[in-house]
Amino acid sequence: MNLPNKLTMFRIIMVPLMIVLFIINKQLDTLLNNLGLYLIGFIFLLGSFTDFLDGHIARKRDIVTTFGKFIDPLADKLLMTTAMIILSTLYYQNSDGLYMWMPFYIVMIFIARDLTTTSIRMVAMSEGEVVAAHFSGKIKTVFITITFTYYFFIMPINTNVVNIIGMILTIISAGFMIWSAIDYLYKSRKIIFKQI
């Protein structure tokens, strides 16, 4: 197994570790307030960095493999979806303001967007065409990574200003998700509606 694929597999291993840390979050909080969130956030950032690194190494060394094409997007989706579900689970309102504002419908927008782009890629492959990653998808990924980092490390401060900024980041991320899905649909319309 080449180095990029090893990095991708490492990213997949990060997912159950995040889940375990979430499960024992309350116990970790007894050691240090919000320790669980900080650890999950660190793992998320580490996983996100390996996503950049494995792609860079694969292209630089020209070692793109079929397994890599399959496992890399799967690892990305597992990492992002897990982080988003964890944050959504922590969402609640209290009298002091909004804390960890990541409602479930944001997760549904994210999942719907990923299902849309994955379906488009599968249809394109069946037609012998390749749908490359679009600029809108890359922007979406960067902005979601920034938003999640903010949530894991800044939102625990839990002031109204911090929470409002978190809400704004989440809404903008959702906008990028929707834009990315529409962009993929529009640019792949000839493939999708070929035999309607």
Image: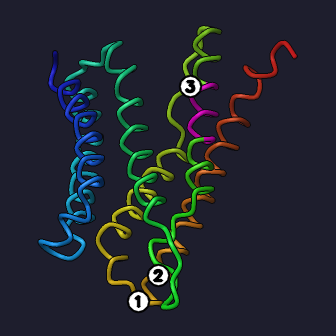
Mark 2 — residue? 163
The residue labelled by disc 3 is: 131
* Secondary structure found at label 1: loop
> Left or right of 92: which side holds 150?
left
Q: Along the polypeptide, which appears first: circle 2 or circle 3? A: 3
Q: For the residues marked 3 and 1, what is the alpha-carbon distance in whole angstroms? A: 43 Å
How far is mark 2 from mark 3, CA to CA?
A: 37 Å
Can you tell which quarter of the image residue 193 is in? top right
Residue type, numbered disc 2: Asn
Secondary structure found at label 3: loop
In the rendered structure, does residue 113 fall within the stretch colored magenta?
Answer: yes
Image quadrant containing the N terminus: top left
Which structural element holds mark 2?
helix
Q: Is residue 57 above or below residue 42?
A: above
Q: Residue at x 21, y 50 (%)?
A: 46
Three-letter amino acid code of the residue under disc 3? Val
Coloration of the structure image: rainbow
Position of residue 26 measured from the top left corner of the image (x, y, whole percent): 25, 65
Name the residue type under label 1: Thr
Residue shown at 39%/61% (left/top)?
148
Query: From which residue to which does the magenta span run?
Result: 112-120
Residue at 64 percent of width and 34 percent of height: 116
Q: Label 1 near label 2: C-beta < 8 Å? A: yes
Q: Mark 3 or mark 1, which has the lower sequence index?
A: 3
* Pointer 1 residue: 159
Foreground pick, 120 / 43: 43
